[in-house]
Amino acid sequence: MRAEPFSLSSEANFSPNDPRTRIELFCMNLDLLAGEGANALAADAEDAAHNHYSLNVEYVGQVPPLVDSNGNITNDFRGISMVIVRLNDLMPADLGDVLIRLNLHGMSSNRVRLGIGHVGGGPPDDPGAVGTPAPQTPPAPVTPLTLAQFQAQAGNASAVAGPDGIRFLEQATWGVTDADLAHVRSVGIQSYLNEQYNTPPQFAAVQSNYPATPLYPVNQPTPCDATCVRDNYTLYPLQRQFMTNTLTQPDQLRQRVAFALHEFIVVAGRDLNNNEASWYAPYLQTIDRDAFGNFRQLLFDITLNPGMGRYLDMAGNSRVSPNENYARELMQLFSIGTDLLNQDGTPVLDANGNRVPTYGQTEITNFARVFTGWVIPNTNVVINGVTTSVPNYISPMAFSNNNGANGPFDIGAKTLLNGLQLPACSNCTNNAANMATYKNAELNAAIDNIFNHQNSGPYVCSQLIHHLVTSNPSPGYVGRCAAAFANNGSGVRGDLKAVITAILLDPEARGDVKTDPNYGRLREPVQFMGNLLRLFNATSDGVLVTNTAGSFSTPLGQDVFNPPTVFSYFPADYGLPGTSLIAPEFGILDTSTTYQRANFVNTLFLANNANGIAANPPNRPTGTQTNYSAYQAQAGNPADLVDMLNTNMMHGTMSSAMRTSIINAVTAITSSDAANRTRTAIYLVATSSQYQVER
């Protein structure tokens, strides 16, 4: 309706309640899936001061063809797409020129110039930018792929022959190894995923990668030497097992997903009798066992897990004064979140444009009343030849033995989410059998109420996408994953295998190149460590994140299995300062932890003549060493060495400026010192921001 310069408000706007100007952008080669709409796209504009403004995309569609009076197409413009964006409320009225682009599936368009308030000024054109007039001959329309067709293509072996094979393994494992890369390129992603789903965890007795641990009493028995204390009253054996699993075990996908689940369904070891291993291990086993199961089962199992019961005060919860901790965090952090969501993860807004809360104090109180009467019973174990009564953290929590009129169970009527009414029990008093039947049914009804809530799919999908792929997924990406959560293709809701497959085979996850500057995620400390150790063929005793022997992850901001709060190691909604981006892992990145990241790489590759982490018996029996001989073979030609690191560490995303800088630094080292050349190149790549932000 108007040509530039554009004012921020338009009298010709079709919305009476929102006069903000909308702008039509026209583009070609918009590779949408069939049925994919505006929520798959993002747009942003940059001004002269390098401020970036996100622009809400409200519509996308093909430009219709011109048709003559006889119904014949005279000009077919359907190969050109029209995108309508809304100008950002934070833009100044007389901003001048901005550079605007579109982003789809992790890919960016070229940027074009337009004027806000007046024409002129603004940032310089991008290098190589040219005018972009409409073509004389419009491109032919392309039939878009369905999601199933795209997944079939992305899942075959040819799709990961290039850089995307490395990107996939960074998302689905704790790091790329030569063997894993060769295998996934041989069988393809879909077959690899099926293999992973069918790879059992190593300890069959507990169906987990964490072994059964013997129960020990609250107070240390006599005698209990240093090894006894280390293995039973610290997290040392579990933390060591975690890193051993990370580096050596074949079921990498289970481990990666289980840790992601741990990061938003949180229990901290320090709150379980100061890190008693036998109190914490069953929680890890539950997460590990259920990682490929149904989310509903995970919610049920974690609710009755004694470690969770102690951590968030459900154990011993009584009707006299119901503790609300577990009820609140179960909804807020573990399952549905605080704001009502559309299925694409965007917030539901009321008539005034305000977010709608998912629940209120009434629901918190009533769920807390449901979670009453459960306790951690004692059991007898033999320690040092003496039969001792200890809290049983291995079995699920049980009913309290006190079923009388003054018992801990709340048997009154309750109102849960979406107004669900749970009836009171009329025949429970002094009747243990009826009480057990009623409380079991009530607990299951409460779990079902949360599991079937409209938020559970988009909320869980958003959390897992953040931890595995990218911190700022498009609503379209979240929506496709939420659809898999709602129905795995066989009518089953909450199937985590379907969810994981949807996440890892989505067009926003797959592809050799991702050029959207908002795409990706900062490698959190344990991923940063695991990626380097696996790529460079580390041999290790697994003692890397244990405080007993000196943790390497804690100085980086991540004390494994000891998140500082129920909000985990870093806030899930942490915003990157100066932007509109979500960047959770940046919540623990500061001057100190940035230095410590570099120090860790230095320890592995440069210090102590590159002998890695030295042994320090008894707690660190062999230490950790890396093997970079394959890279050292390229050190005679610094460009070849850097290109090999670029391919294997960064799947080809290294900027030309960074490449030149590292080549120059390596060339400055005498060619006779191939080992030092190699170690320096690895150090410079690993400590760069371009590597540490996984894209």
Image (spheres, rainbow, N blue to C red):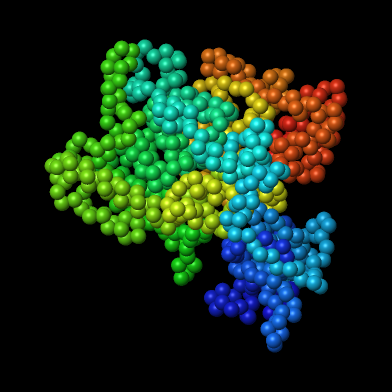
- Residue drawn where x is 54% and y is 41% of the image: 194
Please determine whether, in this image, residue 286 is positioned above or below residue 66.
Answer: above
- Residue drawn where x is 55% and y is 35% of the image: 252
Give the farthest residue toward the bottom: 69
- Residue drawn where x is 40% and y is 28% of the image: 205
Quadrant location of the N terminus?
bottom right
95 to the left or right of 419: right
338 or 163, which is in the foreground?
163
Quadrant location of the C terminus?
top right
Can residue 132 be seen here? The reply is: yes
Please determine whether, in this image, residue 175 is positioned above or below residue 629.
Answer: below
- Residue drawn where x is 47% and y is 63% of the image: 348
Q: Percent position (x, y) of residue 267? A: 43, 37
Q: Percent position (x, y) of residue 616? A: 58, 15
Please determine whether, in this image, residue 271 is positioned above or below residue 369.
Answer: above
Can you tell which quarter of the image residue 278 is in? top left
Can residue 679 be seen here? The reply is: no
691 to the left or right of 214: right
Q: Give the total number of marks visible in the rendering.
A: 0
Can you tell which quarter of the image residue 74 is in? bottom right
Please determine whether, in this image, residue 568 is positioned above or below residue 489.
Answer: above
Q: Percent position (x, y) of residue 104? A: 65, 58
Q: Percent position (x, y) of residue 315? A: 31, 37
